[in-house]
Every structure is written in structure tokens, then in C-alpha cells.
Image (cartoon, rainbow, N blue to C red):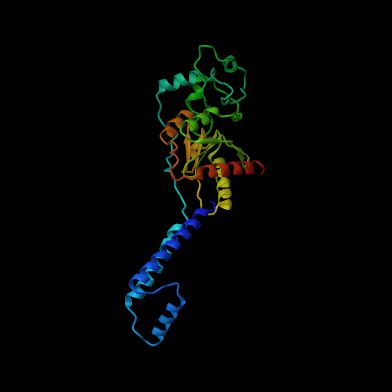
Amino acid sequence: MRFRFDNILLGLLWTLAMSLASIFWFNTVYGFNIFSGQHWQYLAYMQAAHTPVRVGFYISMVAIIFIFIFGLYLIIRPRTRKIRLPIKRISHNKHYDTDKNASNTAAVPSQQSATSITANVPPAQPPVATQTNTTAPSASARPPRLVIPITGGGFSSGRLGASNPPQTGTSTPTVQPADWPELREIFTSAGYVVKTAPKIKGVQIALLAIGTNETLWMGGVGIKTTDMRAAIDKLAQIFTDTLDETYININGFVIAAPDAATSEFQDILMFNTTNELRDYITRMPNPPLPDDDDGIFDAYSEYIDAVINHIGKI
């Protein structure tokens, strides 16, 4: 990904070392100076007159040339790192304790804050119970957390039904944009570097973070897995067009995907809540920088910033 000037210096040092070794060997064993034109002329006369020359002379010359070329290759050969993290799909059909679900859903209406995701479902008739959802949380309530109501595909079952009366409306819930501080806190605690979340192909990404070994995490909340796949493909195309040898491993995830029950993408992680995401990322922390990083991670971080800035202008 960048030009290494130290490879030229190492190659020059290797050339000088092999030259000194060759001079010492041929002068000591055969009395031949490889930098003397008269010696090479005398060798040519011996070969033209079919005068026998020691076989070890030619073997030594071939061996030194081979060692020189092989050593030079080891110094200047490209070194690329293509590391793929193991991908594990989190099933959305987990069985939770009924009592735990009841206690969690009871706290949903009164614990929404600026960072929560609200679902605007117009009721057929204004029941009294629905008006209590907009009241401010009491002082004795526990701190608000990110709770995602879901109404799509196989997900909508008991949580909303336990706390809300039956609705006759047919409109789907809309996810309000938020700053997603809880997602940033999860990845920051795991050692990742959180970047500005861009909007890719009309899809607002909830989180974008990078890690060592050219790893990138990208996630969304309440969006379809097909939209996340389109955003990942767009980002991967930019990486392919602008990078020659470096591979960036993109890990995608979606929280509360509406099409989770019918999704066909095995490489996109799916979670029901942010607590599931926290448990998974806690087991997959960002590894520390290697000792031979030499500023590679800083250059990688600057490159991602440039890509984010470029996507924001498309």
C-alpha cells in the first residue's frame, strides 16, 4: 500500500555484502579477482584453448549468483496480509425466559430517551394505554437502554403484544435517526476505533469501526439485510478500485432486521438487541497492534477517513 524506501537500502547492503564475499572467496581459493578485466581475459583465453579449469570455480560462481538473487528476492518481495476473521451467524430464533421477557417489555414504554428507537404506529382508535408511552421516565426508573420494537417477518411476536393493545392499522414502523452512542461504546470498549458513520447507497449506517489487520466493522439498526449487503458491496468496490495488494476484511451486522426470517446472507450477523451484540463483541475484541506495525494502522485509519469523506460526496 505504500512505497518502502528501506527495501532499496537493504538491497544495496546485500549487494555490497555479496560482492565482498565473492572477492574474498575467489582471491583466496582460486587467485581470481572478479573485478579485474585482465583476469577475465585470461579466463577467456583458457576456455578458447580448451585448457582445463577447475570445476569448483564454475560451481562457486553459480552458487554465489543464486544466493545473491534469492536473498534479493527475500528482501524486496511484497508482503501482504489477508486475514479473515471467522464469521458466526447469530440466530434470531433464540428461546428466552418468559418471565424475563415480561419484565423487559414492561419497562419499554417508560424508558425511551434521545438514543432510543421509537415506532410510530397510528392506532385505529386512541386508547388511553397508548398515551402513556410518551410520558417522561420517572426518577426511580433504571437508566434507559436501546430497545428495538420489531414488527417484521417472525420477529414481532410477544414483546409488543405484551405491552401494547391490539392495533388495526396496517402501516409499518419507522426508525428515527439517532446518534447510536451505545453502539460506539460497545466497540470502543472492545478496543476498536470508531469512525463517522456514512450514508451509503441511501442507507444510513449506524456504526463504522476499524481494527488491526485491516479489519472493518459496519452495522445498521432496523434496516434490511439486503440494504446492508448493498452498502458492503459498494464499500468493497471502492477498496478494490483504490488498493492494489491490501485486502480489507469487512464484517457486517444488523440489529432487528425486518427481513431476518428470510435473509439469505450467511456473512451478515443478525442480532435481536444491542445486548446480544455486546456479548458477541466482548468475545471478539480487537487484537493489539503488532510490534512491526511501522505506522501501517495509522495509514489505514487515514485511508478509511478519506473513503468516508469520498462516499459522503457521492
Total of numbered circles in the picture?
Answer: 0
Please report the residue visible at 41 percent of the width from the left and 86 percent of the height from the top: 48
200 or 217: nearer the eye? 217
- Residue 307 percent coordinates (x, y): 60, 44
Q: Quadrant of residue 226?
A: top right
- Residue 196 percent coordinates (x, y): 59, 36
82 or 314: nearer the eye? 82
Please report the residue visible at 61 percent of the width from the left and 43 percent of the height from the top: 306
Q: Above or below — where is 110 with respect to 55?
A: above
**Residue 79 seen in the figure:** yes
199 or 291: nearer the eye? 291
Which residue, as the protein is rendered here, is positioned at the far right?
313
Q: Above or below — where is 198 with respect to 97?
A: below
Q: Quadrant of residue 22?
A: bottom left
Which residue, as the protein is rendered here, is positioned at the far bottom?
49
- Residue 176 percent coordinates (x, y): 61, 28
281 or 190: nearer the eye? 190
Q: Quadrant of the C terminus?
A: top right
Q: Above or below — where is 84 with respect to 259?
A: below
- Residue 92 percent coordinates (x, y): 45, 34
Q: Quadrant of residue 89?
A: top left
**Residue 93 seen in the figure:** no
